[in-house]
Image (tube, rainbow, N blue to C red):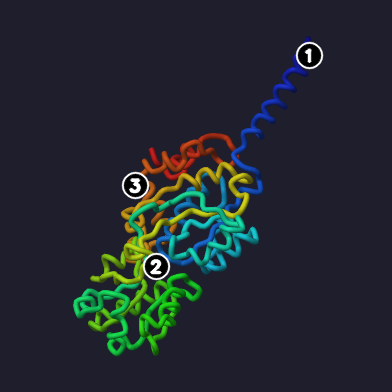
Amino acid sequence: MPRILKTLAAALMIGAAFAGTARAGDADSCKTVRMSDVGWTDITAITAMTGGLLEQMGYTGDIKQLAVPVTFASMKSGDIDVFLGNWMPSMEGDIRAYLDDKSVEQVSANLPEGAKYTLAVPQYTYDKGLHDFKDIAKFKDSLGGKFYGIEPGNDGNRHILDMIKDPQFKLDGFELVESSEAGMLSQVQKATSANEDIVFLGWAPHPMNVNFKMQYLTGGDALFGPNFGGAVVYSTVRKGYLDQCPNVGKFIKQLKFDIGMENEIMGQILNNNADPKEAAVAWVKAHPDVLKGWLDGVTTFDGSGPALDSVKKGLGIQ
């Protein structure tokens, strides 16, 4: 009997160990989640937030700053797993080939409404009569023949370059000034402080809509999409990621944000120089109810328990 009991106990221990392995949240290869951040503050905010939550779940968020075209190419090559900033339709030209060959998958709309992305001007410039894309040519002198964009390779910059080439807009002699989001906003601040005319890439959500009195231009439907470049922002993953890493994939699929939330976090980053991860995590701690939907049915990386419990404990949420 003692020998039988020992054998039975050993079998139970093996069974328990096997059960623990079987219920693991994801394979070891999924522990590091490689994400792209293209340097726009809204994408920086939600990517930092996602990385912070993944850490509380036992994963590692590896965030790399890459341009939009490089992001999708890196997803195809298997070097990036997740990108949370697929703005559509403005990124249609960047992502279409990857969607068609199924190397990149759009898994869910994380910002389903309220976003927009097109050209904008200060209110005082708008009041002078620059209301539409076709009005820009008439303001060439006061604009210095310049459009202010963001980082090279960006889809918005490409739309501006296409517009300059298009005869219907009569923009001969105009040029695009490429820099970065911060660089562009610095130029807008300089121009508005001097009451000078400027035309630049504007979007929402973003604190610029509060920090500057500005108006979006009509007439850009063919380039940026209708309704002032009205956009839906998608979460995307590389081919096969949802099958290979179903637990973290479920979390990514369930992420949903809104304009107010992103504006609040971005305001902390841009206006108060807050660290993106700290600002994002602080927002979650102040609004813990969002976690229920994001983490429904998701476990920790090792499968030892619900991700919701682990995240709340790690962030000190009661």
Note whether 260 is above or below 172 in the view shown.
above
Left or right: residue 119 compared with residue 311: left
Q: Residue at x 25, y 84 (%)?
A: 196
Residue 177 visible to an observer of this rendering:
no
Label 3 sits on residue: 286
Residue 305 visible to an observer of this rendering:
yes
Task: Find the residue positioned furthest to the left.
Answer: 127
Query: Distance from label 2 to label 1 (Cα)?
Result: 74 Å
- Density class for disc 1 (Cα within 10 Å; few <14, some 14-19, many ≥20) is few
Q: Residue at x 35, y 63 (%)?
A: 226
Classify residue 14 by image quadrant. Answer: top right
- Density class for disc 3 (Cα within 10 Å; few <14, some 14-19, many ≥20) is few
Q: Nearer the viewer, mark 2 or mark 1?
A: 2
- Density class for disc 2 (Cα within 10 Å; few <14, some 14-19, many ≥20) is many
Task: Find the residue positioned furthest to the front.
Answer: 168
Query: Distance from label 3 to label 1 (Cα)?
Result: 56 Å
Please identify the quadrant where the C terminus is shown: top left
Task: Name the kind of residue labelled 3 in the image.
Answer: Ala
Label 1 sits on residue: 4
Residue 224: which numbered mark, if any? 2
Q: Secondary structure at mark 1?
A: helix
